[in-house]
Image (cartoon, rainbow, N blue to C red):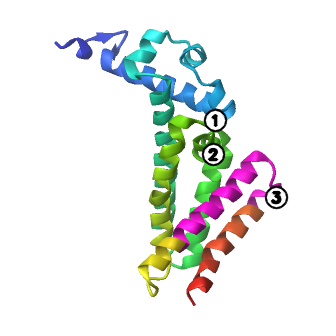
Amino acid sequence: MPVEGRTWAGTTLSDRKAARRRQLLEAGLDLLGSGGSSSVSVRAVCRQCKLTERYFYENFADRDELIIAVYENVVTEAHQALVDAVSTAPRERRARAEAAVTAFVELIIDDPRKGRVLLLAPFADPALSRRGVERIPMFAELVRDQLSDKVDEDDRAMTATALVGGLANLFTAYLGGTLQVSRERLIAHCVRLVLGVDALHS
């Protein structure tokens, strides 16, 4: 039997490796999302999840690779939350807008670490600065697909990109405490912004 398939205490080596990777990613999320970029180091991550550096390097080449993996996990989760919200909402535009905004706000507020990783970390950590820029089109495409198809495709793309940027700034201010409104008011305002873009194309 291959070494990775052998069991010890009821689990295989592959299972234990996967569990350690999850521990490291969770520690990275906690440190990056709570203490910011400067709080993340190989030693700090290992101390957080009570693993030796040997296990860290079994999974990641260095600290930057861990941070990128943490960021990409949050990006994937946020993107999927939006896709699921829109796909299961009624086809009426307001209902879809409310579902998408609510899903995103819940993600970044119910676990503020994820909001900080997604919205703040790319500005603070050089390892993520390019990644943050690269992921904007991914979210802009979701917004563009919800806009009227009766206007020029370039206009739809520009509107979607501008809207993503504006919403990101709102959420960043909310997470940072400089925008002090209720969750309900934040959602309602964002929905009005999403629905109001049609006026740009009228």
Residue 88 is at least partly visible in this image: no
In the rendered image, which quarter is residue 55 located in?
Answer: top left
Whether the magenta-drawn stretch holds residue 169 is answered as: yes
Residue at x 51%, y 35% (from the top left corner): 127
Q: Is residue 59 left or right of residue 156?
A: left
Residue 118 is at least partly visible in this image: yes
Q: Nearer the viewer, residue 94 or 59?
A: 59
Q: How far is mark 1 from mark 2, CA to CA?
A: 8 Å
Task: Point out which mark residue 33 bears.
Answer: 1
> Measured along the vertical axis of the image, is residue 191 above or below residue 179?
below
Q: How far is mark 3 from mark 2, CA to CA?
A: 17 Å
Mark 3: which secondary structure?
loop
Task: Point out which mark residue 115 bears.
Answer: 2
Q: Nearer the viewer, residue 121 or 196?
A: 121
Q: Give yes or no for contact between labels 1 and 2 (Cβ–Cβ under 8 Å).
A: yes
Q: Nearer the viewer, residue 154 or 31?
A: 154
Residue 166: % across, % down: 65, 63
- Residue interval drawn in magenta: 159-184
Residue 202: % across, % down: 57, 90
Badge 1 amino acid? Gly
In the rendered image, which quarter is residue 194 located in?
Answer: bottom right
Question: Which residue position is annotated with label 3?
Answer: 181
Mark 1: which secondary structure?
helix
Question: Residue lying furthest bottom in this view?
Answer: 202
Mark 2: which secondary structure?
helix
Badge 2 amino acid? Gly
Residue at x 46%, y 86% (from the top left corner): 151
